[in-house]
Amino acid sequence: AAGDITIQSGVTVNLCLNDNDLNMGNYYISVSDGATLNIYDCKNHGEISNSSTSMAPAIIDNSGGTVNLHGGTISYAGAYGSAIHNSSDGVLNIYSGAAVESTESGDAVYTDTSGSVNIYGGTVESAGGTALYNLGTANITGGEVTSRSTDYTVYNRGGTLTVGGSAEIYN
């Protein structure tokens, strides 16, 4: 990417990765209040990633919009951010076929106090940080949440956490 990508309020973007990779480098996708980003992957191997030296706080910064992950992988390689930062009444929905991962010490999903995340399927995984860092509302009813480190798999810090259905949580 040549710069940050902003999805403005009232706009819906449907992105099909179609087995392609989008490297954001040092930039990120910002989803504004009232905007919607739907990510699909028709062939199950597409990925949105960043540079390992990235200073961007996230690959996707959801600031009050809705992000629906129906497929593909969001892979964060930085050390001090997250693959998806969910804040300001943002809603993140993760469905079967989608993956969110942090390959270094960053978090896979970080949800602020006013954000909410719903994991219906797919995988959320961290190699060195927390897989799901929650200060808002997190509902995990399916899929897998995994941490391959000694850090937390799910860190619920004053938020609301509901786990049920076929959800699997591993450390």
Image (cartoon, helix red, strand yellow):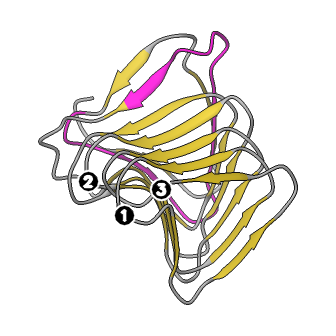
Mark 2 Cα-neighbour bin, 10 Å: few <14, some 14–19, many ≥20: many
**Which residue is depicted at the point 53% across and 75% down?**
88
Is there a contact, CB below 8 Å, between mark 2 and mark 1? yes
Q: Mark on residue 68?
A: none
**Which residue is depicted at the point 41% across and 47% down?**
148
Between 37 and 142, the one nearer to me in the picture: 142
Q: Where does residue 65 sit, x and y in percent of width and height?
A: 60, 60
Could you tell me which quadrant the N terminus lies in?
top left
Q: Where does residue 111 sit, x and y in percent of width and height?
A: 52, 69
The residue that disc 1 covers is 151
Q: Measure how far apart labels 3 and 2 are at the Cα level.
A: 10 Å
Viewer-nearest of discs 2 and 1 = 1
Q: Quadrant of residue 91?
A: bottom right
**Local SS, label 1:** loop
Query: Is 164 one of the magenta-colored residues?
Result: no
Mark 1: which amino acid? Answer: Asp
Between 73 and 90, the one nearer to me in the picture: 73
Between 79 and 92, the one nearer to me in the picture: 79
**Local SS, label 2:** loop
Q: Measure how far apart labels 2 and 1 are at the Cα level.
A: 9 Å
Mark 2: which amino acid? Answer: Ser
Residue 109's place in the image compared with 68, above or below, is below
The residue that disc 3 covers is 131
Please state the extent of the stretch shown in magenta in the rendering: 25-48
Mark 3 Cα-neighbour bin, 10 Å: few <14, some 14–19, many ≥20: many
Query: Going by the image, does 56 lie left or right of 146?
Result: left
Residue 120's place in the image compared with 162, above or below, is above
**Which residue is depicted at the point 67% across and 13% down?**
42
